Amino acid sequence: MNIEQWSGYEVSELVLEEAANWIAFLDSKSEDENRQIAFYEWLEAHPSHQHAYLELSELWAKSACIKSMEHMVEKSKIVSFPGQIPRLSIPTDIPQSSSSPAWAYSLAIGLIFVGLSLPIIQHLV
Amino acid sequence: MDKNDLLSFEGALEQFIAHTKSQQLAILANMVSMAEAEEILQEAYLKIYLLVSKNPNKEQPLVQLMSLQPMLYSIVKNFAISNIRHQKVVTLYLQQSGSFMAESESLQPQSSECELIQKDQDALLLSAINQLPPICRQVFVQRKLHSKSHADIAAMLGISTKTVESHLAKGLALCRAFVRKSKQEENNTLRANST
């Protein structure tokens, strides 16, 4: 017999989802009093809400205790951050450019031209 | 909380304790010693107090507290189970060591056992985080392991704080589902092995 069976309660997925949403909201440190009051009203409304909140808030607290294992977090699939500059602050009137600067193209074309001309110059000399 | 609210809240808390304590003690009496039961109850009431005291709605504090009775019961039950588990680890160690040494001598291995259990739980949680979808995991790791604020994460990823909140909620729910599933599988394996 596991703890859930022993304690005699089952919490629905919907209630767990609501509890997770409330925990994430409380974590945002939002000062929206109406939403805070709404959280307490939700919490007090049904025992299953309290069970779900309690279980998830304990898991939430425990997940901060594995900082020493951070090097073991799977990094292979983590999307890298697009830099420290927020996407919205990039001016939109600048044409999209690739990673190479514009002068690099001129230099490359110049070198190719010189390279192609060399046999002709040698022939003339 | 202003002075009047505080007085009203503390009065309500006293009434709440008076109303619930004997019942909780009766439940705990079958599980732990009286001294441990008192200690567990103190911690449980403190948890409830800290939670309710943050409610911006200061009206009818007794009603608020009374409606959290199921939570009080769960907190008490969780503390009692942790206590019993801890005692089991101690007893198991003493039985396996085959000698009842002085308490001071047994402290070191006992804490090592507890450490192992803790590491197991941490490893399970780490696996749960590792199975999260990539962006969700990134947000979760930045918040829980790097202690970045929602606003910082939103700026770094170029998303709204609302989306950060949504990823955290999703990450938490997925971690819970993973941990629960793993524990169920472990229980099933143990049951199969014991038969």
Image: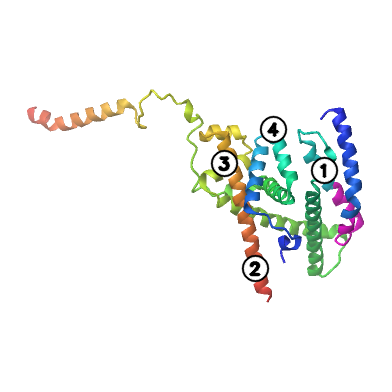
Displayed quadrant of residue B117: bottom right
Asked if badge 2 and badge 3 are on a common chain, one would say yes
Residue A110 at x, y = what percent? 22, 27
Question: According to the image, label 1 marks what residue?
Answer: B65
**Secondary structure found at label 4:** helix
> Residue at the bottom extreme?
B195
Of tags 2 and 1, the one toward the viewer is: 1
Q: Residue at x 68, y 35 (%)?
A: A35
Q: Chain of mark 4?
A: A
**Residue designated by label 2:** B188
Write the start and end of the magenta stretch as one range: B25-42
Disc 3 and disc 4: Cα gap in Å?
26 Å
Label 1–label 3 contact, CB within 8 A: no
Q: Which residue is mark 4?
A: A34
Question: Residue A33, position in %: x, y?
Answer: 70, 31
What separation in Å lies between label 4 and label 2 (alpha carbons)? Answer: 45 Å
Q: Mark 4 Cα within 10 Å, few/some/many (few <14, many 20+)?
A: few
Question: x and y percent of residue B127 in the render?
Answer: 59, 54
Q: Secondary structure at mark 3?
A: helix
Q: CA distance from mark 2 to mark 1?
A: 38 Å
Name the chain letter of the residue that bears numbered label 3: B
Residue sitting farthest toward the left: A124
User: What is the chain letter for disc 2?
Assistant: B
> Do the residues marked 2 and 1 share a common chain?
yes
Secondary structure beneath label 1: helix
* Mark 1 burial class by Cα count in 10 Å: few <14, some 14-19, many 20+: many
Q: Callout 2, which amino acid?
A: Asn
Query: What amino acid type should be assigned to the residue bearing mark 3?
Result: Val
Badge 1: chain ID = B
